[in-house]
Amino acid sequence: MRCRCGRDLEVPALRHIRQLDLATDDPGVTGRRGASWGLRQGALFAAGAVLIAIGLTAAAYYQWHRWRLDVDAVAWENLDEELKMIDQASINQCWTTWLKIRDAEIGPYNPPEFIMNRAVSAAWLKIVIGGLSVAALGLVLVVSAFLVPSSRADERPE
């Protein structure tokens, strides 16, 4: 057979090609590699993926609810009117009011809702940070699955 460049090339007949030995699945010859991950890499990757999923789910859930909490201080609605009443009160009215307040039981402290929401938000922030930390640990495990040498590579003859 003649090439475009002008050289004569020898091409075997089809029956001679059939008599040749079959190619082997040697990765060095074909350039392809088989499955290279062993049990170690699979376990690291799976554990890391689970930790990422759990950590990000927890962080997203609690952060979503933190955004919905009302943590701003509530302004006094009738403060101006109350201050005017105090300014206009006589000394006797102030004294009798003081005596009533002094002898009255206060009872348990019930903080305003925004104060309670601030405490809940602070607790939930710790959970969000913990969830992100768990996800970061999972990411380290996933990345290490790619960096750890394969146990199958040790078994291959050279």
Image (cartoon, rainbow, N blue to C red):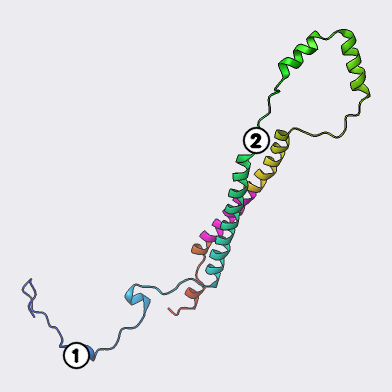
Mark 2 packing: few (<14 Cα in 10 Å), some, or many (20+)? some
Query: Which of the numbered marks, if any, corresponds to residue 16?
Result: 1
Q: Quadrant of residue 89?
A: top right
Q: Would you say 108 lies left or right of 34 here?
A: right
Residue 134 inside the magenta-drawn segment: yes
Q: Can you say which quadrant of the picture contains the C terminus?
A: bottom left
Residue appearing at x 54%, y 56% in the figure: 139
Give, as a three-letter code, the residue at label 2: Asp
Q: Is residue 71 left or right of residue 106?
A: left
Task: Look at label 1 and name its amino acid.
Answer: His
Could you tell me which residue is drawn at 88 percent across and 17 percent down? 97
Confirm or deny contact between disc 2 and disc 1 (CB under 8 A). Answer: no
* 38 relative position to 15: left or right: right
Magenta-tinted stretch: 129-143
Question: What residue lies at 92% left-to-right and 18% top-to-bottom?
Answer: 99
Residue 70 numbered mark, or none: 2
Left or right, 14 with reference to 60: left
Residue drawn at x 69%, y 37% as measured from the top left? 118
